[in-house]
Amino acid sequence: MLNFFLIISGKFISFVSRFLNLGNGSTWPGEVALSIKSNFIKKIIEKNTLKIILIAGTNGKTTTARLIQTILLKNGYNVFQNAAGANLLNGIASSLIANVGLNGKINKDFAIFEIDENTLPLILKEIPSPDFIVILNLFRDQLDRYGEVNTIAKKWKDALKRLDEKTTLIFNSDDPQVAFLGNESKAKVSYFGLDNKNVDSEYQHASDSTYCPNCQTKLNYNSVYFSHLGDWNCTKCGYEHPKKTFTSFPLYPLLGTYNQYNTNAAVLLSKDLGLSNEKIKNAFKDFKPAFGRQETLDINGKKAQIFLSKNPTGLNESLKTIAIHNAENLLLVLNDQIPDGLDISWIWDVDFENFITQFKNITVSGDRVFDMGLRLKYAGFRNFQTEEDLTKAVNVALEKTAKNEILYILPTYSAMLEVRKILTGKKIL
Amino acid sequence: MKNLSLTIGWLYPELMSTYGDRGNIITFQKRCQWRGIQTEVLELNPGFDAKLLEQCDFLFMGGAQDEQQQIVAEDLIKKKNILKQIIENNTPGLYICGAYQFLGRYYKEADGSIIKGLGILDIYTENPGTNAPRLIGNILISTEKNTTLVGFENHGGRTYLGEKVKPFGTVIKGFGNNGNDKTEGAIYKNSFGTYLHGPVLPKNPEFADLLIKFTLEKKYDLSINFHALNDSLEKEAYNAIAKRLGVKL
């Protein structure tokens, strides 16, 4: 009876918040439900038989969820997921409220939840036996909020130990710390990774896990795909990257090496569900990126493409990817609100020095516009303009972009929401 | 001026560089370069030859994750005597967060167990336990020379100063060494220990220049007057934080 009440009131809150354009409909109903009944998620899930897919990792959660959703939808399954970025317990509870009937039944085949790093151990208490857990990677991100990479890895390992055989783990073999997580679990593990020879010769500065997770000796890499992801082995204890069952696909719907990983994860999971390459490929033909993740917007005949870039690895990879596409116009937006992380030190771990001659126009904005400006100055850039007012910055950057060119926008999380609102006139979260 | 050239010893860049601390090295080098001073960086990773320390005119070490700090501890303890001698001999150095704690006498874990430090700085650090919050946020301090500095701190340990060191600064906004006594960091001879990340040097160019000056004066035994650089962007970045912390400019 309580559930019934929570579902009704949650749906009502969601409606009101959307109606008034308050922009928090994806977390608020769940927040209220959980505050009244803390095991709300568990109780709803227990009553249903749908398959559950959890996706965790520092970078690529939303895109991977989107890829899996696209594959499943195009192949005739009923699917729902939590709103992009609403990946704490309140976001998951909210998505349940939106999709559950008043009888407590969810009329869907799959739930896909992207899960925040700190929330993964918590959700596994509510959903102790999910069908799949995808773990993409573990990079340095928001140290003030998450703590250091090793701290998260430890929490995850403890949580994953409690799983049973019912769960299939889809793990990145190229990330030493992620690969190591599979070691002590009863769940079945399948590994994805890369095998192309398109390799970086050096580590980027922001690499985190170049030491063996088993014995703390420096790892040997036969190849590095980016950051600390690659074909690694420990010369001391002999621990090495687990055998990868899946490494390449004929069609990648998004740019960038990091999206090859996201795609490989989604494809490996889909193949495990019995879908053929052909069916997956057909689904990808209609793929549309999630908002802010390489999403392209048309603005008065010019194109703006948004690459969410929220940590050193993410920003490095965005810069590399747009450089390959001869990007000339760049707008960097650095915020330090709670979803971005309060500490912006990380911009000094980004290898801006590699892109000195790349851009014709650079505009910088955001809450920490001058910090980003300083980073560029000390990297050796001269041709950048700082503009505190984000709307002005967007206009300036668009003005400098020629008609047939693309403005590449690299914002942090809250900055991405703000930029998008300016460009589309609509709030999304 | 004759050709000036400085060697920077960067202790454990692969392990002790979790919080953008590389920005301090970049800033030190660039501000030298803009004044025609050459710099070279020696990256000192585990297993490095201790004699390299004697070639360094300036030392830098940043913060790290716990496990990585252990690898460093095992290596650095073997080089303790040389490092101590260099610091006693007035070689300038900047030691941030984990490195700062590590130079002290000891670090007391929440369970009471004691991890010995290098004992070069007369300070000690205690972890008050998992119930006490980490000290996180933007910070503004004033130093003896009436300059103010901004940074970002993020530490669980509380550090207390002994008699042989002076505080680096006084906390105006933020937590500092321990959140209680308003001290921040420590100075011993020409070595500076601090909790200020951010990184600290880009937004505080006077402090960066002071370190460069100390380093040149120690190496070349001359008194130096720098020509001013255009620091307007540095000022704006500093002011943005000061303003946000409600400190009058």
Image: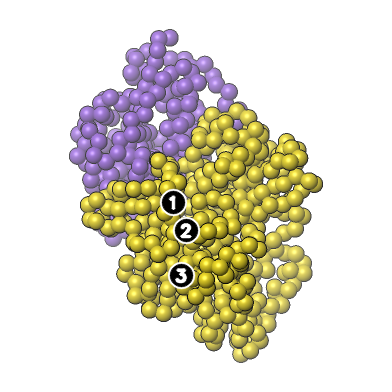
Chain colours: A yellow, B purple
Q: Residue at x 80, y 46 (%)?
A: A300
Name the quarter where the N terminus of chain B is drawn.
top left
Earlier in the chain: of badge 2 and badge 3, it is 3
Earlier in the chain: of badge 3 and badge 1, it is 3
- Looking at the rendered structure, the kind of residue marked 2 is Ser
Q: Is residue A379 visible?
A: yes
- Looking at the rendered structure, the kind of residue marked 1 is Asn
The answer to the question of whether label 2 and label 3 lie on touching residues, with beta carbons closer than 8 A, is no
Q: Is residue B67 left or right of residue B28?
A: left
Task: Check if mark 3 and mark 1 are on a common chain.
Answer: yes
The chain letter under disc 1 is A
Quick check: B129 above or below B218? below
The answer to the question of whether label 2 and label 1 lie on touching residues, with beta carbons closer than 8 A, is yes
Read off the residue under disc 2. A248
Label drawn at residue A196? 1
Name the quarter where the C terminus of chain B is drawn.
top right
Label drawn at residue A20? none
> How much space separates mark 3 and mark 1, taking CA atoms?
25 Å
Q: Residues within 10 Å of mark 1 (few under 14, many from 20)?
A: few
> How much space separates mark 2 and mark 1, taking CA atoms?
8 Å
Q: Is residue B104 visible?
A: no
Read off the residue under disc 3. A133
Q: Is residue A79 left or right of residue A264?
A: right
Q: Residues within 10 Å of mark 2 (few under 14, many from 20)?
A: some
Quick check: B51 above or below B73? above
Picture quadrant of residue A245: bottom left
- Please state the horizontal and vertical placement of residue B66, each as a whole percent of the image: 33, 52
Q: Residue at x 52, y 73 (%)?
A: A275
